[in-house]
Image: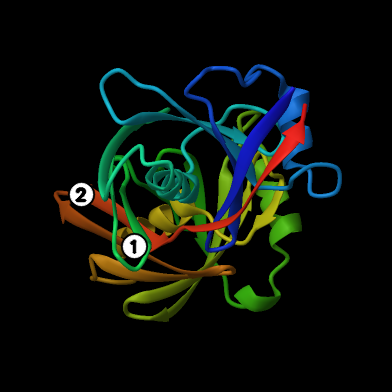
């Protein structure tokens, strides 16, 4: 069987997109999904995303990590899926869709910037060494000095597979403060099991963590990721973070067909 796919990227986070509104994609085939995401033997991507019908919203997002397993929310993937839905004429400039972590609102600006509302964050765990929270996916955040030369893969894997997070693991973010409203970050993503060029839920977690730690008082924060720039904004009241938005580019790369 041949399937049609689209490739999208958001600040270097790249995804294989499939329009599965007809329900023909073999979504339980872990080996196939991992093969399609393989950069040498398949299409290549940090993950695969299915756009499916939903009775109450514009569409449903089903996200798989590059290891073939269905996973938690992916922020940049969500933004790319919104751009994909617009390309398919499923939506105009504004949308609501459902994902594994619930309902999301999003919009596409004239310049192609996609703004995606993330879940509210109420539980921020602060320790002397790190901050932990769930922004749709679990995230460990810690400040480091020499971010440019930091061994993200080795140190990230050590924490991800360590006793702290057990079998489920966590995404691991290493952060450097640039100025009062700007931070740089590098992320080790579980499921990819490597550093990725960007992580949307990670950028969201870093922005909230830096505000919670008092590293910034801003509620709109610029994030330098390896693949570009993202902006995270939010409202904060009584330690709760609401109206959380992740903003950045989401770009079509190419379209093709592949035999499966």
Judge left or right: residue 167 versus residue 120: right
In this view, 61 is above or below 149? above
User: Could you tell me residue 86's position as x and y percent?
Assistant: 37, 46
Name which of mark 1 and mark 2 comes first in the sequence. Answer: 1
Label 1, label 2: how many angstroms apart (C-alpha)? Answer: 19 Å
Q: Does any portion of residue 131 appear in the rendered image?
A: no
SS category of the residue bearing label 2:
strand
What residue sits right under mark 1 in the picture? Answer: 213
Circle number at residue 31: none
Q: For the view shown, which residue lies furthest in the right direction?
A: 41
Circle number at residue 243: 2
Query: Mark 1 against mark 2, which lies toward the viewer?
Result: 2
Q: Does any portion of residue 152 appear in the rendered image?
A: yes
SS category of the residue bearing label 1:
helix
Depth check, front residue: 71 or 3: 3
User: Could you tell me residue 224's position as x and y percent?
Assistant: 48, 72
At x 28%, y 27%, the residue is: 57
In this view, 12 is above or below 103? below
At x 34%, y 68%, the residue is: 111
Q: For the view shown, which residue lies furthest in the left direction?
A: 237
């Amino acid at each position: 069987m041949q399937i049609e796919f689209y490739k999208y990227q958001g600040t270097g986070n790249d995804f294989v997109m499939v329009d599965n509104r007809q329900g023909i994609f073999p979504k339980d085939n872990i080996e196939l999904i991992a093969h399609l995401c393989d950069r040498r033997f398949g299409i290549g991507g940090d993950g695969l995303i299915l756009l499916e019908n939903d009775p109450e919203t514009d569409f449903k997002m089903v996200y798989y990590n590059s290891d073939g397993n269905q996973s938690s929310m992916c922020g940049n993937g969500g933004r790319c899926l919104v751009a994909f839905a617009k390309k398919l004429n499923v939506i105009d400039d504004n949308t609501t869709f459902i994902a594994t972590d619930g309902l999301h609102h999003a919009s596409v600006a004239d310049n192609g910037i996609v703004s995606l509302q993330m879940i509210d964050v109420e539980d921020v765990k602060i320790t002397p060494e790190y901050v932990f929270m769930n922004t749709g996916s679990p995230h460990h955040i810690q400040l480091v000095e020499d971010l440019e030369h930091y061994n993200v893969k080795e140190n990230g894997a050590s924490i991800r597979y360590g006793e702290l997070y057990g079998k489920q693991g966590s995404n691991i973010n290493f952060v450097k403060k640039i100025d009062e409203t700007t931070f740089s970050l590098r992320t080790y993503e579980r499921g990819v099991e490597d550093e990725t060029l960007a992580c949307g839920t990670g950028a969201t977690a870093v922005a909230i963590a830096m505000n919670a730690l008092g590293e910034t008082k801003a509620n709109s924060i610029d994030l330098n990721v390896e693949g570009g720039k993202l902006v995270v904004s939010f409202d904060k009241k009584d330690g709760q973070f609401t109206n959380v938005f992740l903003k950045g580019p989401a770009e079509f790369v190419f379209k093709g067909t592949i035999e499966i």
